[in-house]
Image (cartoon, rainbow, N blue to C red):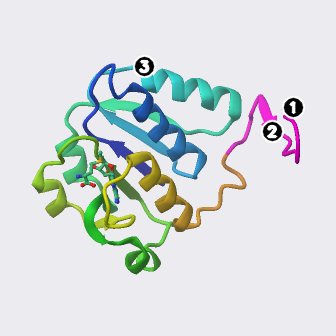
Amino acid sequence: MITVMRYGHRVGRDKRTTTHVGLVARAFGADEFILVGNDKSPIKTIKSVTKNWGGSFKCSLIKNWRKYLKDFKGLKLHLTMYGEPYKSVISKIKTNQNILIFVGAEKVPIDVYKTCDFNIAVISQPHSEIGALAVFLENLKIDTSKKFKDAKLKIEPEREGKSVIKL
Ligand code: SAM
């Protein structure tokens, strides 16, 4: 089970970025997205994508994120440009266990760096939570072949044009 926790969401301003973090989490093979705070709108969008495009991706809001992180039974990872290069730690990470991936927005409190098992950089340069999460999940090599069951819509990949099948 792979959970992505998004910390630091500014209502209005971060709506699109947070939604994209959740959509990347789903598309690249995570099982769950948890947003810190009380803005329901990204959750609503991600749930509606899951309804149409399949799978059992879970989405929820959380207030007491510190307790959740502290009590989480499994491997705790924090994506940050200050961490160890992902290429040097990713081979140690097995995906058949509970994994929590903590993704920031604004400044992440220092105790997160200490609570997590690994602080992981996807290139030691500042860029984007969306980009970092996508690259990291893709390199975890999660099997996504059975993730999108009971979809209403499916893309038939085309060299040119667009083909969406209604199932
Ligand atoms: N100072 C931040 C940091 O620690 O990476 C950059 C802030 S960035 C606007 C917001 C979030 O994007 C960060 O909290 C982190 O989760 C993610 N992020 C940005 N650049 C990253 C990188 N090079 N490697 C891993 N995560 C990154």
Residue at x 49% of width, y 21% of height: 44
The answer for how far apart the CA atoms under marks 1 and 2 are is: 6 Å
Q: Earlier in the sequence, mark 1 or mark 2?
A: 2
Distance of mark 3 from mark 1, alpha carbons?
A: 27 Å
Q: Are marks 1 and 2 in contact (CB under 8 Å)?
A: yes
Which residues are drawn in magenta?
148-164
Which amino acid does the dot numbered 2 rest on? Answer: Ile
Is residue 139 found left or right of 10 in the rendered image?
Answer: right
Image point (49%, 36%), residue name: 20
- Depth check: give the residue in front, 133 or 54: 133
- Disc number at residue 41? 3
User: Which of the pair 145/13 is nearer the observer?
Assistant: 13
Which residue carries the number 1 mark?
165
Residue 56 placed where, x, y %?
A: 60, 38
Q: Circle 2 sits on which residue?
A: 155
Q: Amino acid at mark 3?
A: Ser
Residue type at mark 1 is Ile
Instruction: Identify the residue at the far left of this view.
Output: 110
Quadrant of the rendering where the C terminus is positioned: top right
Tell me residue 51's x, y (percent): 65, 27
